[in-house]
Image (cartoon, grey):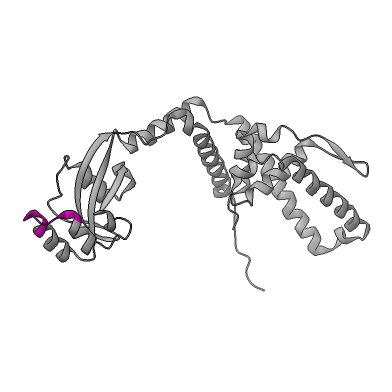
Amino acid sequence: MLKTTIAAALALALASGAAMAEFKDFTVNGELITKAQQEALAAEAISSNPNPHEMIANPQIEEEIRQMMIEQTVMGAYARKQGLDKLPEVEGDIRRATNMVLENHAVRDFLKKNPVTEKDLEAQYKQEADRWGPEEYRVRHILVKTEAEAKTLLEQINKGASFAKTAAEKSLDEGSKDVGGILDWQSPSVYTMELANAIRGLKKGETAKAPVQSPAGFHIVKVEDIRPAELFPKFEDRKEDLRHLLMQRKVQGFIHEQILRADVKDVPAK
């Protein structure tokens, strides 16, 4: 499965115009290779790359795409001379490739007519910032398998047992048990809804009155400290990632809408 859809790759490419600006027309055995053809091949290459952002930023991308175009043009001419383009299986491959090219251009046309605006970016940023919240919490927790065990440990802590020592001895969370159950500064939104709600309901120094369930088990939760949010990125630092995100959403919605309109039927077996 492609790591990034070609439609999404086109969105990334269009949003990163600088990376595509150096392609230039050239010829191979007299056949013109246009800047647009190279950009299309770049989008296909980006779509199959596990790190598309890194590939877009690669200063060698223009030369790599140029060499790919030369190879494809030379070998395509060779195949036609051999008559391979007339084989039924090759004609089927050509139809699929044609549809892919048309899809790419349909997506380009859609994105040009439906760009992501500054207002869209600001609205998405606000939505994410609101989800993050105005405060960050430094939490201490103990994770155990059963509610009964969690209640027993909570009762011991309420009677004076050390939370940190209990976490070190009993918690199933290998990432925090050796530091007394500490989960460093975070927005409650990064946790499950149940944990987030429990954390937001506590004041500094308070421990939840009852264990909190999550898919991992049952948690005893204590809020060590609260501060104004510091970790959420500034708008300018998040802006380009948001642009890519919203462009991908637009493209995926556009493609989904076209698919819903299609008349797709299974052909009965012969």
Assign the C terminus to one quadrant of the image. bottom right
Q: In the rendered structure, which segment of residues is drawn in magenta? A: 156-164
Nearer to us in this view, 71 or 91: 71
Residue at the (31%, 41%) spot, across then down: 187
Q: Point out the residue furthest to the bottom here.
A: 270
Q: Of 256 and 163, which appears nearest the observer?
A: 163
Tell me if residue 160 is in the magenta stretch. yes
Name the residue rendered at 34%, 38% in the picture: 131
Q: Indicate the position of residue 80 as horizontal and vertical percent values.
A: 90, 56
Looking at the rendered image, the quarter that the N terminus falls into is bottom right
Q: Please state the horizontal and vertical placement of residue 28, each as a whole percent of the image.
A: 89, 44
Taking the image as shown, residue 252 lies to the left or right of residue 78, namely: left
Horizontal side of residue 185 vs 155, given as left or right: right
Q: Residue at x 81, y 63 (%)?
A: 88
Quarter of image, res 186 = top left
Q: Is residue 106 left or right of residue 65?
A: left
Residue 171: percent from left, percent from top: 24, 61
On the picture, is 105 further left or further right than 140?
A: right
